[in-house]
Amino acid sequence: MRSLNLATTTAQLLPTVVIVGRPNVGKSTLFNAILGNRRSLVGDEPGMTRDRIFGEANYHGKPFGLIDTGGIIPHDDQLIPTQILKQARVALEDAAHILFVVDGRAEITSADRDLSQLLRTLNKPITLVVNKIDVKAREDLVPEFYSLGLGDPFAVSAEHKLGLGDLLGHVTATFPAFTEEQRTLLEEEKSQQRRIKVAIIGRPNVGKSTMLNALVGSERAIVSPVAGTTRDSVDETVVEGNVTYRFVDTAGIRRKGKTTEMTEKLSVVMARRNIRMANVVLLMIDAVEGVLGADATIAGYAKEEGRAVILVVNKWDAAEGKSKRAFTQSIRDELKFLEYAPIIFASALNREGIRRIFTAVRHAYDSASKRVSTGELNRFVQQLKFEGELKVYYMTQASVRPPTFVAFTDQANKLHFSAERFLVNRLRENFGFEATPIVIKPKRR
């Protein structure tokens, strides 16, 4: 198994640009503006981004990797700021260019000066970006930032996308434009790889970030005992054979009434978006606390989106005296609507059960992607014996992920729950649909 570094997710060919700065200077807004989409959380509260977030950008035929880091306070000894600095250092080691972002509407702070000194020791190309310069009057404030000793500052407004062309032209000046051969190589690599996107979801503090780190074999996400440490979605890619797994660690999802900060509300929205975009969902359950009502709510989100689901009971090493059989039964009782989801007992901290998770993800993806020919389905229908007067004449598969079937019947209304359940169970038995929901769309012949 080979874990890919952030800067090498595209065949180790992309130079990487890293965005750094103290909290609330507009790093994530700049990141999103360069990428052209809302990849990072953006808001008025400082410290919204904590982990490092990766994206791929292109300026005038010159592709590059772009990394958004959490707000750095160099001499803050608190746990989470220290972890943010640690995550940023990992990104900076591989950086081809550093964008040091400061707030053009505020005076230079001691944190700005400390960070500029820290960056100069790296001996990397650095560009000073004075953000939030959106009116002519503020342009007069830019010259004072020469005192940071980082050369000519670039005045931009990330929010209004002003000054980005000059900035990106400067940053990518030494970057190579991809040749046709390199572009073809990348396309061939992508076409040959089976790509599975996996969202890691669950309540706050069930060990999602620890599990991400265990799956990719590195300290990719910030881990702390503080619930809600992950706010943005953090992703990492792992290549194994011809399969590329892209794991996304989402923010812990709380009930609507429990999310008061705007940051957390946005985190929940982003987490649900990542469920929708995933192929397979790992639903983390805390072995010590057991199955709670919140777990059922979160599981419902995955069910609604039609995602393949694997239930991962984490922290099993700490669940002293508990029986796997009894715990499995409690899961089946609380999550009756996920009876098709396999259960894996694991310990992210001790890296136990990790190989089983990779195997289960691959099987779940294959199952959700399976197609059954109309001929096979018609032979299957002829063997069915329904209770009551329902008659199914024939079936066809309309789509995959989730497997969706159109059943042509003698009734105008939707199938009775018991008939639909019978049909779904028989499809599973005959064609091996594991870990995935099955959708039946009845249609009168």
Image (tube, rainbow, N blue to C red):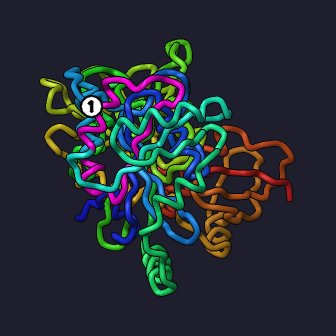
In this rendering, position of residue 272 left or right of residue 95: right
Residue 93 location in percent, x, y?
Answer: 24, 53
**437 vs 111: above or below:** below
- Depth order, front residue of 380/150: 150
The question of residue 117 being in magenta is answered with: yes
Say whether residue 311 is visible.
no
- Image quarter where the N terminus lies is bottom left
The question of residue 182 being in magenta is answered with: no
In this rendering, position of residue 179 left or right of residue 405: left
Give me the residue at 25% from left, 27% from top: 224
Number of other residues with Cα within 10 Å of mark 1, as a class: few under 14, some 14 to 19, many 20 or more? some
Residue stretch rendered in magenta on the structure: 90-119
Report how many numbered discs are placed on residues in the image. Answer: 1
Dot 1 corresponds to which residue?
A: 114
Residue 308 location in percent, x, y?
Answer: 49, 49
Give me the residue at 40% from left, 67% from top: 14
In this rendering, position of residue 81 left or right of residue 300: left
The quadrant holding residue 10 is: bottom left
